[in-house]
Image: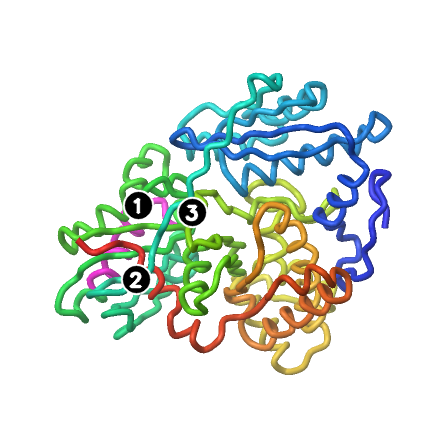
Amino acid sequence: MKYLGIEFEMKNKPVLDPEFIPFGPWMNAYLEGAERPIRIAVEREQGKISVFEGKLRGEEFREANLRFLDRYVKFLLWGVGGFKVTICGCDEEVKHLQEAYVENGERGFDVGFMQDVYERPFEIVTCGEEDFPEANESAVSVGGHMEGCRIGFDAGGSDRKVSAVIDGVSVYSEEIVWHPKLSEDIQYQFDGIVESFKTAASKMPRVDGIGVSSAGVFIGNAPMVSSLFVKIPRKDRDLVKTVYDRAALEIGDVPIVVANDGDVTALAGSMSMGVAPVMGIAMGTSEAGGYVNADRNVLGWFNELAFAPVDLNEKAMADPWSGDTGVGATYFSQDSVIKLAPRAGIELDESLTPAEKLSYVQKLMEEGNKGAEEIFTSIGTYLAHTLVLYSNFYDLKYVLILGRVASGTGGEKLIEECNRVLKDEYPAFAEQITVMLPDEKMRRVGQSVAAASLPASK
């Protein structure tokens, strides 16, 4: 296969999306012929800085150089997170990034998002080698506290789940449908959170801590940006940032810790299997990513892989929120199933919600529909090639796939195809990585128990 003058091998294409151009394998082939070294530093809160080394090709590959740099920096922003990107070694190419990464530019969504999270102006700058910043990473230990009476809360876009957990065992769980993405009044989300907290609290003699797994990007317990609060006016931003802390006060003076749902997924996998490192990928309303390293610590990175690029095809589906094409949300979520359905000859009733459309396709899968099977095998092929990309940024050993998209026989077919493609196309990598669905033990520990383990007791 050839893209922008770079040839790379790709034996396995998604059966319903043969135009897919996987960023990871292409990038690896691009870097094999690159000779001009570059360095990129991404700065986030509290002076934390992540540094990455790369290379560019010669001037005859100008278009490929610009494409690589654009997608690489984009991945770093959504993988690591940050308000300042410093690049050394390619001043001329960086000008194109600086033109794109302004509030009204091509990457205006990314700029606005980062500024909302860090409450700092976003910038991309160049520097000489002597002024390049030093790395300042700091992984954080989270979770694993099982003692006492705890509330575990999982805030999703379509439902909220809560568990009462005593000494690591869930004694009560409930799941309630809600619609936080549609509410313009933060009181709706607050009331729902408090109701779930109080229900769980009523099942235990006391509450020693509250752990929350939530969609969004957090600094401390504050959701700086989250799809759960997308309709809330900016004037109520402070109410959003304090929503979980305020809800906990309704229970009493108990410790609360809020974490990104992807990180909690990875934590749950590590706790249940007793292994590390673990990457968790939840395929639901969107794609949620999380990671715990070999020491079972979180990196303090964004891991917002829903907006990280995976496909270089410029004609790929655009993500409705960010407006960018080829990002993870349209490949590893219910949107991917909906996108692929017409190509599989499956007509979806437009009056159905996205979740209902997914359920319909899953029902067809259970009935042995060939088109439905092709949808899940295509997503499995996407995943295999994308894990090659993720391995450039994360040390991958165990990858846990969760979420509604991965449930039932469709999820089993997805994993089966992913592992088949890995063994066929990347045999050395396949020997180093285990990609799986949660087993029965993982289901028993689950997201809510892992979330409940987040805070240390008083």
Q: Amino acid at mark 3?
A: Gly
Residue beneath label 3, please?
A: 216
Pointer 3 local density, CA inside 10 Å: few below 14, some 14–19, many at least 20:
many
Q: Position of residue 357 (x, y in %)?
A: 57, 66
Q: Nearer the viewer, residue 271 or 11?
A: 271
Earlier along the polypeptide chain: callout 2 or callout 1? 2
Whether residue 181 is visible here, answered yes or no, is: no
Residue drawn at the location 23% of the way across and 63% of the way down:
150
Q: Secondary structure at mark 3?
A: loop
Q: Secondary structure at mark 2?
A: strand
Residue 152 is marked as 2
Left or right, 328 with reference to 369: left
Whether residue 394 is visible here, answered yes or no, is: yes
Q: Which residues are magenta?
A: 181-198
Residue 186 is marked as 1
Residue drawn at the location 27% of the way across and 48% of the way down:
244
Distance in Å between CA atoms under marks 2 and 3: 17 Å
Looking at this rendering, what residue extends furthest in the bottom direction?
367
Q: Nearer the viewer, residue 105 or 279?
A: 279
Q: Position of residue 448 (x, y in %)?
A: 35, 64
Q: Amino acid at mark 1?
A: Ile
